[in-house]
Image: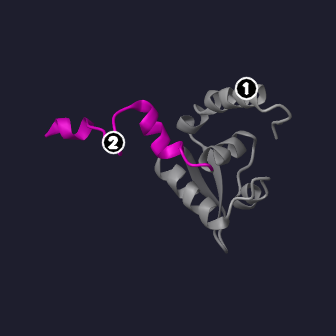
């Protein structure tokens, strides 16, 4: 029975790329991480990003990132309750991944720029 506690449940396979994509593989999640890395913390700040994420998708991705342990939320206002979001260490460890995507994107998509 103790072995069951140490087992990890995989959605599709035990491939690390597949596991990462299960959390990060949609078109919005890494953009939210990008925004957090650049200093955004509040819901309205994410909505102001140039990609114009829909509110329902933003709420869903923030919840997914929180559940995955990539971000943490804390209330900064009580009435109504409003939250700020911050990257956990697991989220901060995505920085080199995004830096590599920036380097690749700048090399193959001339004229792109980092916000």
Which quadrant of the structure image shows residue 37? top right
Q: How many marks?
A: 2
In the drawing, does residue 5 fall left or right of residue 54?
A: left
Q: Quadrant of residue 70?
A: top right
Q: Provide the residue span drawn in magenta.
A: 1-27
Q: How is the image coloured?
A: one colour
- Magenta stretch encompasses residue 47: no
Q: Residue 14: which numbered mark, if any?
A: none
Measured as percent of width and height from the top left, residue 66 is found at 52, 51
Comparing 42 with 29, the one in front is 29
Residue matched to label 1? 103
Q: Residue at x 35, y 46 (%)?
A: 11
The residue lying toward the viewer, choosing from 14 and 6, is 14
- The location of residue 74, given as percent across then percent down, is 60, 56
Foreground disc of the pair 2, 1: 1
> Which residue ends up furthest to the left in the rendered image?
1
Q: Residue furthest right?
A: 111
* Residue at 63% in and 59% down: 58
Please indicate, yes or no, whether residue 69 appears anywhere in the rendered image. Answer: no
Q: Which quadrant is the N terminus positioned in?
A: top left
* Residue 103: x %, y % from top left: 73, 26
- The answer to whether mark 2 and mark 1 are in CB contact below 8 A is no
Which residue is label 2 attached to? Answer: 10
Quick one: label 2 or label 1, which is nearer the N terminus?
Answer: 2
C-alpha span from label 2 to label 1: 30 Å
Q: Is residue 19 visible?
A: yes
Q: Give SS at disc 1.
A: helix
Bin the neighbour count of mark 1 within 10 Å (Cα to Cα): few under 14, some 14-19, many 20 and up: few
Q: Position of residue 61 (x, y in %)?
A: 57, 55
Camera-side residue of 67 and 9? 9
Task: Let me know if residue 17 is in the magenta part.
Answer: yes
């Amino acid at each position: 029975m103790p072995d069951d506690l140490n087992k990890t449940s995989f959605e599709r396979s035990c491939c690390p790329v597949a596991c990462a994509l299960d959390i990060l593989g949609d078109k919005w999640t890494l953009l939210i991480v990008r925004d957090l890395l650049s200093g955004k913390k509040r819901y309205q700040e994410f909505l102001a990003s140039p990609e114009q994420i829909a509110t329902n998708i933003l709420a869903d991705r923030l919840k997914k990132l929180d559940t995955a342990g990539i971000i943490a939320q804390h209330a900064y206002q009580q009435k109504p309750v409003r939250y700020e979001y911050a990257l956990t260490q697991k989220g901060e460890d995505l920085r080199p991944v995004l830096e590599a995507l920036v380097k690749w994107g700048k090399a193959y998509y001339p004229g792109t720029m980092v916000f």
